[in-house]
Amino acid sequence: MTAGLTVHQRMLRPTTGTSIGETDFRVQTTQYIALAVLLFVAPFGLYNVIIGRTVFGTTLFALTVAMLAIAWRCRNAARVRLLPSLGMAVTLVSGTVLATVELRAIGWLWCYPAIMAIYCIVPERWANATNLLMLGASVPVLLQVTEPEFASRAIVTLLVTSLFSAILIRVISVQQLDLRRAVTTDFLTGCLNRVDLERMMEATALRARTTGEPASLLALDIDHFKRINDQLGHAAGDRVLRHVGEVLRDHRRAGEHVFRIGGEEFLWLMPATDEREACARADAIRTAVAAIGTLPGRTVTISIGGAILDDEDTGERWARRADEALYEAKGGGRDRFALAA
Amino acid sequence: MQRNEQRRFRVTAAMGLAIACTTLGAPFALMHLGEQDWRVTAGGLGGTVLLCLHAVLMQLNRREARWTLGLITVLGIWYLVHLVHAFGVMGLLWCFPGVLGLYCLLPERIAWLANALLLLVLVLIVGHGVLPHDLLLRAGATLLAVNLFTALLLRAGIERFSHLQQRIVTDPLTGLLNRYELEPVLESRLGARRRTDTDAALLALDIDHFKRVNDQHGHAVGDEVLRTAGRMLGTSISGGDKAFRLGGEEFLVVLCDIDARLAVERAETLRLALAGALSLPGYPITVSIGVATAMASDSWSQWMSRADDALYRAKDAGRDRVCVALCAGPDEPSRQPSEAFGAIAGPKGGARAPA
């Protein structure tokens, strides 16, 4: 194990930064759509200006510019900006409805690519809403300007297309979320790993400061873990880690997060928890871990250091204080709890 | 790995599509039973049934449901072409959900091909004479746009899947695999051993006295040593071989198609190469390696613990060496706890010759 590496040192180690896995895929697809619009819609606009339909041609140009602006604004962001994208989506909907009024079937065909484009640039829920808007607006128009035979097919195929796109988006989103969860979860213990640690600590500290609530941080370490590994083998060591992880997760309350930050060390983030409660919780956790009985004839114990967030704490300082308290607990004979000054 | 995620996507999407078709497509087909050719209705209903069957098969089996998928693709394209041919623009409308359906059901590249085929047949062959010229032009353009947008959307999603999947199974420090994939990899090698008698060997590798490196030179240096070890192990393997970082300074290499003698040779080469690469100026760093070849009777954890035992004996015998696991069998004397404890008490004194 990376023995001797203290909690705050571990926190300071570089983690892999924001990556493609973290960004919303709509950021990427928005760029694609903008490119497609530039390549296909802009020349079409030019053509219309040349043949004398100046108003229509200029509108298409404006649309292209707006789409490029939207794509440019979100190019480095993690999420698309809702309002401009939504504005573009509504424009697309009204555009296809107007086209249907003017051109009937020929105009109607554009609503299918419009649906896909909307799903590419607008967050899921809003895209679904815009889709309903499209449906609501187009049904009376279709019934007015086309024969009922065509209208009924048009409505059903629009419904099916909307539904298929909604399913496609839903499946992609759920799966991305699932994978993202697996990235932040420690495989062995089921606790969180270090990926989101820093961010969550900062967020907890910030919330505590704005609401005036206390917040506590516990650093936990399994006593003499290296000995277990060396004497009984890694399988036994893994079993201990798994069981301890289970106990910790069982004792976690809503809003709390337990991280395994390496080897046999854990961090417990407790928002809205004051000193008295943190001490009581730490003792309860210690007792519960000692009662596991993973290894016959041997009690697995943990030492815990606690730090209550104070005014000077940065995330790093907070972790260091908890870590120092943990060392104090270890130095005091292990299997105990110590609170940072 | 990436393939698994793509498959998972298609399993869920197929189920969603099947439900959507059953609730929306099939009633519509029935509703129009009186107005149109009964064969069209039958085609729609049959397609729905086939889609449901495919969704269930995908859900139940680990394998790809190739037959149903092939049938759906071929019949689906044929059906859409027939609709356009028979009903003109009203048939054409069904091509839009059809395109989306193909993207949801088929593996990405095959979906591209199938949709290109559909577009080609519709616009170049069927469209002429059936659709008026201006409509045909728009049909081609809108179908192409739907194709493009859906393909790009799917690409963006799949890129994220593979990226996240990569992060899940990779150790961030060394870039080797982490424990996530350990069990399936070992199981698959053992499976091959049982089925086809393919040899496989495990090298359990540990950097000697790594804690001292960390303590004396700092964690930055320690991390650099680990990174170097990861790089060397990563480049030393090829083909189906895999290298893992199990945690801390422990590594595991799975070698395929290799007998015990060759495995020990590889381990020796690795030991020497690593000792050369890892050592700091004036501070030699060595590694110990335990070798265990796969036994048909092993479970993955037994195989691993035999390699672990061999590593342990290498450490016990003075480190900086390779030890081979004893042949596992019912008569194999297991390591006695007392021996193990004694060795821990005096790691330096335990310079016994390797068994």
Image: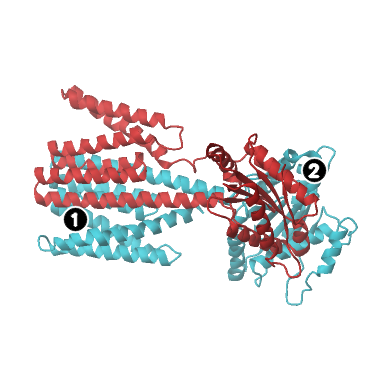
Chain colours: A red, B cyan
Q: Position of residue A186 (x, y in %)?
A: 60, 53
Q: Residue at x 58, y 45 (%)?
A: A195
Tell me the kind of residue under disc 1. Answer: His
Identity of the residue furthest to the bottom in this view: B331
Quickly name the residue at label 2.
B215
Q: Residue at x 23, y 27 (%)?
A: A59
Quickly name the residue at label 1.
B82
Pointer 2 chain: B
Tell me the kind of residue under disc 2. Answer: Asp
Secondary structure found at label 1: helix
Q: Position of residue B325 (x, y in %)?
A: 76, 65
Q: Residue at x 76, y 42 (%)?
A: B277
Would you say B144 lies left or right of A177 here? Answer: left
Disc nearer the start of the sequence (1/2): 1
Identity of the residue furthest to the right in this view: B349
Secondary structure found at label 2: helix
Q: How far separated are the C-alphas under marks 1 and 2? A: 75 Å
Identity of the residue furthest to the front in this view: A276
